[in-house]
Amino acid sequence: MSQAPVLKSSPTASSHAPGVGDDFEFVEVIRGYLNEAAELVDIPGYVREILGQPKNEIIVNFPVKMDDGEYRLFKGYRIQHSNILGPYKGGLRFHETASLDDFKALAALMTWKCSLMNLPLGGGKGGIKFNPRDHSRRELQRITRRFIHALGSNIGPDYDIPAPDMGTNAQTMAWAMDTYMNTVGMVSKQATAGVVTGKPVTSGGTEGRVKATGQGVVHCIREWAERSRFDLKGKKLIVQGYGNVGSHTAVLLSHLGVSLVGVGDHTGYLYNAEGFNSYRMQEYVAEHGSISGYPNGERIEREDFFAIAADLFVPAALEAQIDQTEARALQVKLVAEGANGPCTPSGEKILLERGIDIIPDVIANAGGVTVSYYEWVQNRNSEKWTAEDIDERLELAMKTAYQNMMDFAEANGCSYRIACYGVALQRLARVYSEREIFP
Ligand code: GLU
């Protein structure tokens, strides 16, 4: 007699990574910034209330057959924060600490990003609570496909458009698109390539998407350097997280003469006073999955990493990594937030008091979703833009947003973060005042 298959559910993990203040509630923090900015923009109370909550919260539980023949139950999320400016847009995160509340915060951040960048897109975010490193490629494929299938018509090229985020990449998006296409019937199949962005270029992706977030971070750093009369050449960089965002930022900055002296990821921290070869490290991580074992670097403790004498710091890992201790330790002049929510409010306060500038996530990492938008437009129109086209458009988009942020900050005497929220809110409030509330 054959045994009934065992259904294991995803193990629950602790809510946040090391370095996080126990009192850090991501969703509350984001709501706090919204309220602060709302005071300056003077939006109606009901708009603030609407934007303080996501429009839809979708949770799906789905079983997947593992390589050993057993079944495991996974929990997937899709939070749709706002579609007042256009279809919901935002990444899919595969991470063991993922939670409903964090996805709510991340989805809201997408609304602010798209609005600040003046994209006709709203905000969403989702993913699955599990550690993708524990799974084979075949299992990852089945998990992704079952998740996309479970989401069903909750996503779509005109409704909600996922993209890569932590733990997912172009390959994940190829599986996602293929699964979605196979559920829509023969006739509309080809019209649905835009259901996800961040696809491989050959499968309907766009040139420039892989480096886009890092490229956007670098555009912001250049804008900051120009305005601060700060010569980037010969300066030192430290990066936390050497995935897509961290590694591309480091490689692109190396072209401007900035050397990478400290790097950290989930396996630990490395230091090299002479500077790492950022490109070779990127190749190493692509092959080995982390910086662990990378030659030419001295292993250091997390606390020593934050105290490295450098000029620029790009956090490109999890949220809430820069709390009070880290903010006091940092020796840099600028923190450019490649990650979403890397500074806690008390960490941010200390950084600003110490005269360390912060380019906030809402603008710093918005290059990713901006090029996602270019991909989506190309898919809709069956077009193929060149890498030069994409580069030019992104540069202009980032510069414009940066200027808008600066203008708002100057006019209102607020931080760059609140300025980003303010510009975003102004656009959203205008649309609410034109469309008003149904019925
Ligand atoms: N996951 C990225 C972000 O946090 C990109 C989202 C997208 O391209 O839609 O901005």
Image (cartoon, rainbow, N blue to C red):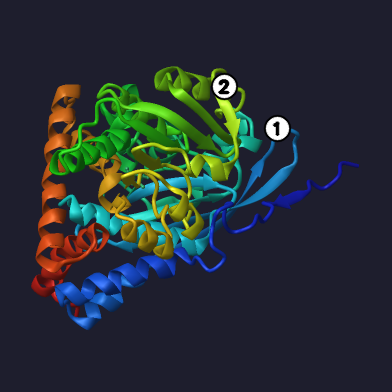
Does 434 sit above or below residue 62?
below
Residue pointed to by mark 2: 294
Does 230 sit above or below residue 437?
above
Task: Find out if the beta carbon at label 2 lies less than 8 Å from the nearest ligand 1 atom.
Answer: no
Does 78 sit above or below residue 366?
below
Corner quadrant of residue 384: top left
Closer to the observer: label 1 or label 2?
A: 2
Amino acid identity at mark 1: Asp
Residue at disc 2, secondary structure? loop
Would residue 201 be found to the left or right of residue 98 on screen? left
Percent coordinates x, y for residue 359 in the rendering: 28, 49
Ligand 1 is found in the corner quadrant, namely top left
Closest to the observer, 42 or 137: 42
Corner quadrant of residue 142: top right
Spatial CA span between label 1 and label 2: 30 Å
| Point 56% across, 45% down: residue | 303
| Point 61% across, 43% down: residue | 131
Closest to the observer, 289 or 9: 289
Q: Quadrant of the C terminus?
A: bottom left
Q: Quadrant of the N terminus?
A: top right
Would residue 207 be found to the left or right of residue 312 on screen? left
| Point 41% across, 41% down: residue | 180
Percent coordinates x, y for residue 369 in the rendering: 28, 43
Residue pointed to by mark 1: 67
